[in-house]
Amino acid sequence: MSFDFILTSLFVFMLLGSVVAIETKSILSAVIAFGVVGFASSCAFMFLGAPDIAITQVVVEVLSLILLIRAVGRVDNMSIEKRVSSVVSIFALVFAGFFLSFSWFALKETNPFGYPSLRVAEHYLKYAIEEIKSANVVTAIILDYRAYDTLGEAVVLFTSILGAFTVLRKIGKKRGEKSNG
């Protein structure tokens, strides 16, 4: 199975999940379809060789799904009606047309897959030991050149875990109060 076929399949899967999320009448089904899109994009990041982004995507996806499912559990599906005027539909179609045409032109201008668009890595490998005075190149890149990026990833992971812990803790706390009372 070719690499391009897998990525194309994931892209089609994400598009189908998006359509289901928009068109379904059940809010819970829309949230689940939204989760499918996020997990498919995480798989795409893994295939593209970006495991740190894929892990961050999964953690944020799980947190947002937990929060959305908690919020959706309290909403009555019967009270929500879908009323879309023709003006909104036309605007959505025009926006989709602009977006697709812009995406097509942007995709045509990118470098072929596997060809680096930036040469930053060459500089890191060549001058890391001299400039940073580090014990090895990996330490120099992570702790100096990419320090803010690494800090940002750590903050995202910490916030996501803290949010999931808070949501799940309240559920467990309420159950404990019912059994004690």
Image: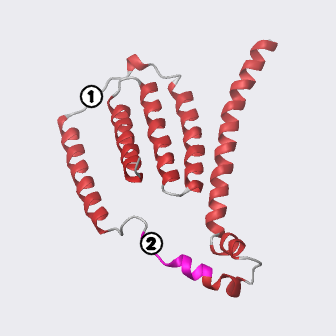
Which residue is more in the foreground, 96 or 141? 141
Q: Residue at x 69, y 71 (%)?
A: 138
Q: Are marks 2 and 1 in contact (CB under 8 Å)?
A: no
Residue 88 in the magenta stretch? The answer is no
| Quadrant assignment, res 151 | bottom right
Position of residue 91 measured from the top left corner of the image (x, y, whole percent): 21, 45
The percent coordinates of residue 69 (x first, y second) are 54, 29
Residue under the point 39% across and 41% down: 14
Q: Which type of secondary structure does the marked residue at label 1 adopt?
A: loop
In the picture, which quadrant includes the C terminus? Answer: top right
Residue type highlighted by circle 1: Arg
Which residue is denoted by mark 1 in the rendering?
83
Mark 2, Cα crowd under 10 Å, few <14 / some 14-19 / many 20+, is few
The residue sitting at 57% across, 28% down in the picture is: 70
Q: Which residues are magenta?
A: 115-125
Within-10-Å neighbours for mark 1: few <14, some 14–19, many 20+ = few
Q: Is residue 150 above or below residue 120?
A: above
Tag in front: 2 or 1: 2
Q: Which residue in the protein does label 2 denote?
A: 116
Locate residue 142 relative to residue 90 in the image: left or right: right
**Residue 179 horizontal side relative to residue 102, left or right:** right
Above/below status of 139 relative to 67: below
As displayed, is residue 85 above or below residue 175? below
Query: In the drawing, what numbered circle is on residue 39?
Result: none
Circle 2: residue type: Pro
Q: Is residue 119 magenta?
A: yes
Q: Position of residue 43 (x, y in %)?
A: 50, 46
Label 2, secondary structure: give it: loop
